[in-house]
Image (cartoon, rainbow, N blue to C red):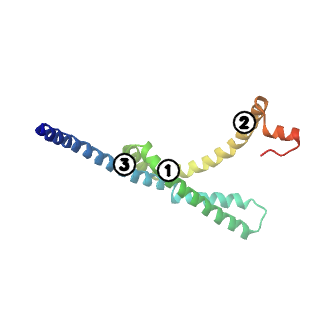
Amino acid sequence: MRVLMVLALGLSLFAAAPATAQDTARDGDAAHRLALAEQYLELTQGANLRKTVEAYFEEAFAKLDAPAEERAWLTENMAAVFETAMDATFADLTDDVAEIYTAEELEAMIAFFDTPMGRSITVKSFDFGVRLQAVMMPHLAAAFAQLGEKYCARFECGATEGAQTGKPVD
């Protein structure tokens, strides 16, 4: 019986070795993909995008009826706040990027976005995103207003209740 237990223990240790090697390889792949994800995000969201963001705010605030000093302050500070938010967002998303894309996909994207055309597309994608948001916002506002009306027609709304009783609704 003791021989069978020793044999079973030996077999389980022998079987565990390949699994451990696979886990180590998987961990190595995960670390590699994480490094690639960081590189990809830096290429697509890094220094070039920061310059574009600053230029965007500079252009946006140039239209304000405000003194030049105030416009410059707004540009500098909005760009800094946006950069801080971007850095935190992309730090939070690095694991997701590494999980979503394979190492081969990340390597291909890095190879592309590290070219002049890839950098140009990155800058233009930000500009497109800003335009997309500006065009989408009125449509979303109208859609949410309609949704709110439908909701209130179907269910009792707190604002309606407050209007009926004359008391504010929390």
Q: Is residue 29 above or below residue 66?
A: above
Relative horizontal placement of residue 85, taking residue 30 as reference (left or right): right
The one of 59 and 117 positioned closer to us in this rendering: 59
Q: Nearer the viewer, residue 9 or 156?
A: 9
Secondary structure under badge 1? helix
Q: Residue furthest front?
A: 1
Q: Which residue is mark 3?
A: 30
| Residue 125 seen in the current view | yes
Say what secondary structure mark 2 lies in: helix
**What's under tag 3, amino acid-wise?**
Ala
Res. 64 image quadrant: bottom right
Question: Residue 11 in the image: x percent, y percent?
Answer: 17, 39
- Of discs 3 and 2, which sits in the foreground? 3
Q: Residue at x 53, y 50 (%)?
A: 122
Towards the viewer: 131 or 157: 157
Expressed as whole percent of the image width and height from the top left, the position of residue 32 reads 35, 51
Q: Where residue 124 is drawn, which disc sits there?
A: none
Point 11% across, 39% down: residue:
3
Mark on residue 93? 1
Q: Distance between the Cα atoms at labels 3 and 2?
A: 41 Å
Question: CB of mark 1 within 8 Å of CB of mark 3?
Answer: no
| Mark 2 or mark 1, earlier in chain | 1
Q: Give the residue drawn at x 46%, y 51%.
A: 94
Q: Which residue is mark 2?
A: 143
| Residues at marks 2 and 1, CA–CA distance in whole angstroms | 29 Å
